[in-house]
Amino acid sequence: MKVISDYTKIGERDFVKSLIPQIVGHGGSFMFWRLPNSDEKNLIVSNSRALMQDEISLEDSKTGFAFSPFNPGQKKFFFNADLIFRFKGDEIADGPDLNNTKYVINDSGEDSEDSPTPYYSTDKKAVAYAGYSELVEAAIRKIESGAIEKIVPSKFKEVELPENFNLLKTFYRLCDKHPNAFVSLVSSPEVGTWLGASPELLVSIDAEDKFKTIALAGTLPNSAGTNLKSVAWTQKEIEEQALVSRYIINCFKKIRVREYAEHGPRTVVAGNLLHLRTDYEVDMREVNFPQLGSVMLKLLHPTSAVCGMPLDPALDFLQKNEGYDREFYSGFLGPVNFEGESKLFVNLRCIQLFEKSARIYAGAGVTADSDPIKEAEEVEMKIQTLNQIINS
């Protein structure tokens, strides 16, 4: 093994493959991600325990990474960025001096096919609802009673990992297959290991203090050559997306923000699926609301796209009927105050990793017009998309 001092001379993949086992060996945590429509990747190493917080304050936090469960009443995890690495293409674009750290990077090329060992989840007690279509039927009955407009029931599927499963290769396959998604790999002693490719931005604050969020709902299969301008959406899907848009607008109204830009809805691609998307933007300087990001984060999570509307009765239904704890599925995650920007995404299209198996999560928005069989088919399609990447 050749030890080198200038690690920027080796490629991104060899570097990350060499570093991750050392992070885990020292009890640290790592967050590896790529933003939508970008060829840059970023890696945060946290050598300290995660901070447990009731809410994430985007304005007051140090540079780090937020990881929140679905249940809004549970603590959120915040990982301080002790080391930061930036990659562009297959090259290391920026990073700290490792000479005075506990990490040693090698470029020997040995064991190039090995997969770094992350932290595995150990709780195997979760049991999904016996029949998803029956769960959808129960949700429709609840909606028809007049108490709720929309419910988003979910399920998971436990799949065995193939013998040749490679964690980093799976991450890179997600990047290739989902160029428009936030692709992430999070691993820590506190949360285990989660992989995901989320198409849904929850809260973004850029360097110019522009706040952004999106309403994303409605699902159709995507095929090569599809003309996005001619996609025919049903009334059910249009109404489902409109509910999410109204949810965001109602959040603005609660805090008396009226100066916002709205663009959409439009059809967008998310891997092998299509969704309806509407974008919202607020100039925080113009409205003189520097805390808007944190305030909206608390109001939006969990959105009606992953829980339902109104929030409280939809959340109560899910907790009583889904039959399992979603943990971090449909929570939120992302970098905070990273290069002057915070970008948090809903944790969708995600995989929870166990030592010999993976748990794949998916859900579908249910309204009074939903067809239980079609909703079950949609969820299975989302699960199979990730299952195919695991077994590629």
Image (tube, rainbow, N blue to C red):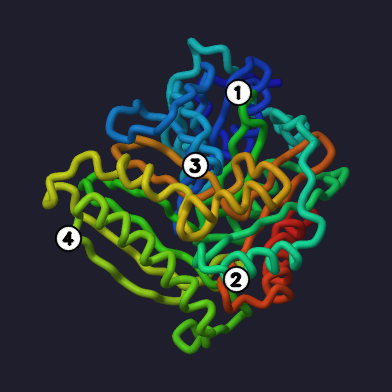
Numbered disc in front, either 1 or 4: 4
Q: Which residue is mark 1?
A: 105
Q: Which mark is residue 333?
A: 3
Q: Are marks 2 and 1 in contact (CB under 8 Å)?
A: no
Callout 4 secondary element? loop
Q: Amino acid at mark 2?
A: Leu
Q: Which residue is mark 4?
A: 259
Callout 3 secondary element? strand
Callout 1 secondary element? loop
Q: CA distance from mark 4 to mark 2?
A: 32 Å
Q: CA distance from mark 1 to mark 4?
A: 50 Å
Q: Quadrant of residue 382?
A: bottom right
Dot 3 crowding, Cα within 10 Å, few <14, some 14–19, many 20+: many
Numbered disc in front, either 1 or 3: 3
Tell me if 203 is positioned left or right of 18 in this view: left
Q: Which residue is mark 2?
A: 273
Numbered disc in front, either 2 or 1: 2
Q: CA distance from mark 3 to mark 2?
A: 22 Å
Q: Are marks 1 and 3 in contact (CB under 8 Å)?
A: no
Q: Are marks 3 and 2 in contact (CB under 8 Å)?
A: no
